[in-house]
Structure formats: structure tokens, C-alpha cells
Amino acid sequence: MCQAQEEYGGCDQPRRRPRVSCAQKCMKCKEASPVLVIRVGDAFCKACFREYFVHKFRAMLGKNRAIYPGEKVLLALSGGPASSSMLRQVQEGLSRETAKKLRFMPGIIYVDEGAVCGQSLAEREKTLLQLETVLQASGFPYHLAHLEEVFDLPSSILQRVPHHPAGPKDNYKEAVEGFIRQQRQEEGGGPSVPERQIQEKLAKVSVRDAPGMEGLAAPEARLLAAVRTEQLIRLFGSVKTLTAKEELLQTLRNHLILHTARAHGYSKVMMGDSCTRLAVKLLTNLSLGRGASLAMDTGFSDDRHGDVVVVRPMREYSAKEIAFYNHLFGVPTVFTPALDTKALEKASIHRVIERFLYGLQAEFPSTVSTVYRTGEKLSVTPGDAGPAAEPERCLLCLCTLDTNVEDGSALQAILVSERLSQQKLPAAAPAGRGCCLGAEEQRGCCMNTTAPGADARADFLPLLCYGCRLTIKDTTCLESLPLYVRSEAERRKRRAAMKLEIQEFLLEDEAVTPGES
Amino acid sequence: MAAPMSLLVEFGGGAELLFDGVKKHQVTLPCQPEPWDIRNLLKWIKQNLLKERPELFIQGDTVRPGILVLINDADWELMGELDYKLQDQDNVVFISTLHGG
Ligand SMILES: [Zn+2]
Ligand SMILES: [Zn+2]
């Protein structure tokens, strides 16, 4: 019953020994012995698991018709299991035979966050060295970015850039055919090898060109880098809770990736969020009040930035599938400490939710997929009705503002109770969120309307969605935010003021026509 | 009486941080009256290898949810989980899937 099948080769199989479920066979080929159980009770052998995994990636991209032939796609690599596995899938896809081949031009970005994750310079260099080995081995162009570079971002990063009007959305088929025709014409010279060399050179150039710490040889650059690192540490030091720190880190990282994509002409960014990760994100978002951007934060494609679309092709893989794939097929990963590595269990909402989900999953194996499928049902409302109806967007995360809501919503309730608590107890923390120093007698608290800087804060909050408001409320020192955030806030404030002025004239006009009041 | 046996125990996905950052441990389990299974192995790991924060690795008598166990490159769910009887030269891998990506 248990003998290995010839076609799978002895070496492919784990060492065989009598085992409890020996009688059970792979559910797909019904021949080989299974090596893992995915979903509820589906046992796969190694070969079938690999096929299932690779196929799922291609099917995901195919089903969504997300990526056009020849399109430049930036893969966001963190060194972690999901994004490393995503990189391998792209490599597999590009090296396939013509019919099933993926046809886009990948590049990779890695964002070094060592400064805020407590890594010393030496540790950061060591991590970067490990990552560069992976990046170089991929043969794709790559960009190494440091989180410090957010201080040099332009404020245009916070503005939505509309799609090109002649987007190829409707003629995917034409685009594919056009690409194939072009490829055939080029095939005469067989330029694949020199092409790759050029790509490699380009990668090197782009790395050198990057602002920040790349030109470490120059002492000024080193000094600038040190100043930036200081700024970054100060910014995160001024954030009171780990939950807010994690949200801020995600926001800044996304801005930096978006900037790199725009600067180098990538029109898609691939993120390696697994379904387990997205389920955690979904519940976290709900509990943080980020319900409005839920579908965008966790869906397959996210076009909030307009010109650069974020896609999540790993969203149907569980963390278990990814871990097994990486282990069985030798996908290299680089472990980098996170903000909260070894932090206390209940240090942030993200961690509490993660623990809660994994705990449930252990007893009810379909928990994660149920949560994930619930998220899928929350579809994005068709936002791009027309250029005239462009909605207001959150300054930080660019989701459609959810704060112009009707009475009776949770936000309204919180705002009212905040106002009330501020009136009666001017020094108390509004709505139970601790003030910057946490002590009641600290009258100079930043949340207090009488304190200096409170005006800036009061101007800032209305520009944010509910979730980002919570993050900013936990940031005690707004001045340490990067300049691009502050100047874009300034710009929007001016624009809003102007709008208000104009509106006064418009309203007078309107008042002439018979109205309800 | 179970004879002493030699195992390769590995930690990955960040779980190695709880073991001084060391991923591969060649270990020898001593003789004991009852046969070695994963349940006993976890106890032994807790007493002999785990350097800090045992609650991040072990919960009750099993591994913390989110930590995968592979026995000779196969899912422990196929091998009887805690009741799997260890044999000399077995390879046991623990991979943490907590906050990966
Ligand atoms: Zn099979
Ligand atoms: Zn927001």
C-alpha cells in the first residue's frame, strides 16, 4: 500500500516509515503519500502540492486580468515567508513555457526598517547583505530603500494621480496579442541574455541613484543618513502605543514603495499578504475603526493611488501553505525583526487579534478562511464614477474619507463624547485615550485645546479617516512627521479655506431659488 | 526502556529567536522508561533548549497555535501529532508563522 510511485522519484518523498495515516493517499493523484494537510483534511503529496501552489498564483493573476503584458511590476519583498514565496512564483511564472508564461517586467523593492526596529547599523548592514544575495540571485532589477528616505518624499505622494484616460482596461486581449507580436519580431536576435545583463546594470545604477544611504562612501551622505535616522527614531519615539506605531510604519512604508514605483515607472505593486495575514488585518482594521478602507486594505487590487495599483496575489494562500512551500522547495527567507518582535502578547491590537485568530484556527480549522471570505464580500463601491465626483481622501492612507457620516454612527458618538469630556474636564484625556504624558495633572497635554500645537492638531484631524485619526492622536509630536505630510496638510487646508470662501457666493445664489428653509 | 536517541531539531520563521537564534540543534535524548513521543520532546525542549518566554512556544502540553510542526518533512497532522513515536535520526522542524510576511 505504501510503496513510493515511480514517477515521483524516491528523493522527492520524505523518508518513508510506517505512520498513522499511512493508508491515506494524496487527494489529488491518489497515489503518492501526502506530506501536508491543507484546508480541512485535504492531504497533498509533495508534487501535487507544488502544482497546486504554482497554479493558484497564475490563476489569481489570470482571473483578475490585473497585469498587462510588458507592464512593469514592482514586487515588495520584506524577506519574510509570503513575499519571498511570491518572488519565487514570479520567477517560476516567467520561466514557464510560452502558453502559460507570465509576461510582465518585474523589479523588486526592499525597505530597510532597521532604524525603528531597534537594529544597530552593523545589524542592518548584515541584514542588507543577506537580502542583496537574494535580490542578486533573482536576476531582476532591484531597489533598496531605507525608511529614512520618507523624510525626502515629495508631497505629491499624498495626491491621487488619475489613471491614464486611454487605459488598456477594456482591451486586455489586444494588449496580449500586441505583446506576442512584438515578441515574435524580437525573437530573431534572441536577446534574452544581453537583456538580462542590461537589467542587472540598471539595477545597480538605480541603487546608486537612490537618495539616502546608498553612497555610504561619502562622509556627507553618512552624516545625512545619521540625521535622518535620528529624526525617524524621534518620530516613532513620540508615538505612544505599539498599535499606532505599527499603523504609522505601514503608512510610511507604503508611501516609500509608491514613490519608488512612480520614480521608476512601475504601474503595479505586488504585495505578499497571505490570507492569514489579511484575516488578521481585516479584524484589526475593524477594531481600529478602519472599516471604510477595509475592502481596499485587504482586497486583491487597490487603486486608491490612481496611477499605481497595488495587487495582492498571495491572498488565497494560508500562512501554513506558504511556510510548507518555502520549506519543501528551499525558498530563502531573511528574518528581520519587526517593531514588536518579542513584544508582550497584548502589546498591540494587531498582536491580540493575531493570537485570537490563531487560537481559534487551532480548534476550528476553517476560521481564517471564513474571516477571509467575509472580507471578500465587502466590495469596493465604484469610486471612479467620474472626475467631477472625486471624493475627499484621507491625507495619510488615501482611502475615501469616511468621516462625513450621518448621525448615530460610532464616529459621531465618539466625537460627541470627546467634546463633552473636553468641556467638563479640560485636562482629562478625551474618550479614555491617554494624553501624551498619561497623568491627569499634566495640564499642558497636547490633546488639551489650550496647549500650543493643539491648533495644528485640530487642523490636521479633519483631513484624516477615522483609523488614521487614532494613529495621529497617539502621536504626541506632530512636528516630527515628515515634511511632505505637513506641507500637504497645509495645502489641503488652504484649498478648503478657499473652497469655503467661494461657497459663500455659491450659497447666496442658491438661496434665491426656493428651498426648504 | 527506550534507548537514547539522536534527533535533529530545527526552528524557523522567527521561532529560533527563543533559542538563542540557533536554528539547528543536534540533540540526544536520554534513556527513559516510556518511549519518546512529540509530547515528551516538547517537555524536554522546554527544560533543555528554550532560553526565554516559553509561552511564546508552548501552550499547555502542545505548541502554541501558529507554530507548524514537520516530522521528516511531513506535516505532523499526518503523523499523529503529539502521539508520534520518535525514532533515532528523526528530523523535527518547528516553523513559526506568527507575524510573517
Ligand atoms: Zn499527489
Ligand atoms: Zn487614513
Image (cartoon, grey):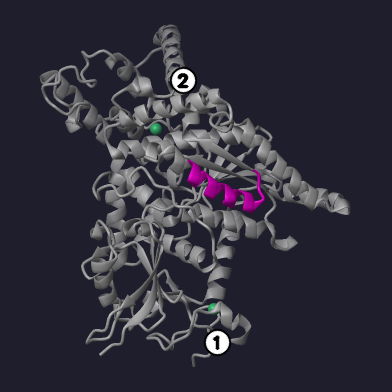
Write the residue at 30% across / 63% down.
Answer: B65
Judge from the rendering whether residue A109 lies leftward or rightward of residue A461; answer left or right: right
Displayed-image quarter of ligand 2: top left
Task: Please state the horizontal and vertical placement of residue A188, each as a whole percent of the image.
Answer: 89, 53
In the image: residue A511, left or right of residue B33: right
Q: Which mark is residue A4?
A: 1
Identify the mark at residue A316; answer none if there is no mark: none
The answer to whether marks 1 and 2 sit on the same chain is: yes
Decide if residue A354 is in sight here: yes
Q: Furthest residue to the right?
A: A188
Q: Point out residue A35 in the picture as x, y percentages from the top left corner.
A: 47, 76
Chain letter of the residue beneath label 1 in the structure image: A
**Is A258 drawn above or below residue A300 in the view shown?**
above
Q: Residue furthest bottom?
A: A1
User: Disc 2 beta carbon < 8 A from ligand 2?
Assistant: no
Residue A152 x/y as whole percent: 51, 24
Local SS, label 2: helix
- Residue type, mark 2 in image: Glu
Q: Nearer the viewer, mark 1 or mark 2?
A: 1
Q: Amino acid at mark 1?
A: Ala
In this image, A346 relative to A223: left or right?
Answer: left
Point out the stretch of residues depicted in magenta: A125-141
- Seen in the picture, residue B81 relative to A100 is either above or below; the reply is below
Residues packed near mark 1 inside 10 Å, few (<14), some (14 to 19) or many (20 plus): some
Residue marked by disc 2: A488
Q: Main secondary structure of the magenta part?
A: helix
- The answer to which of marks 1 and 2 sits earlier in the sequence is 1
Q: Is residue A265 on the magenta stretch?
A: no
**SS at badge 1:** loop
Relative to residue B59, is residue A384 depicted above or below?
A: above
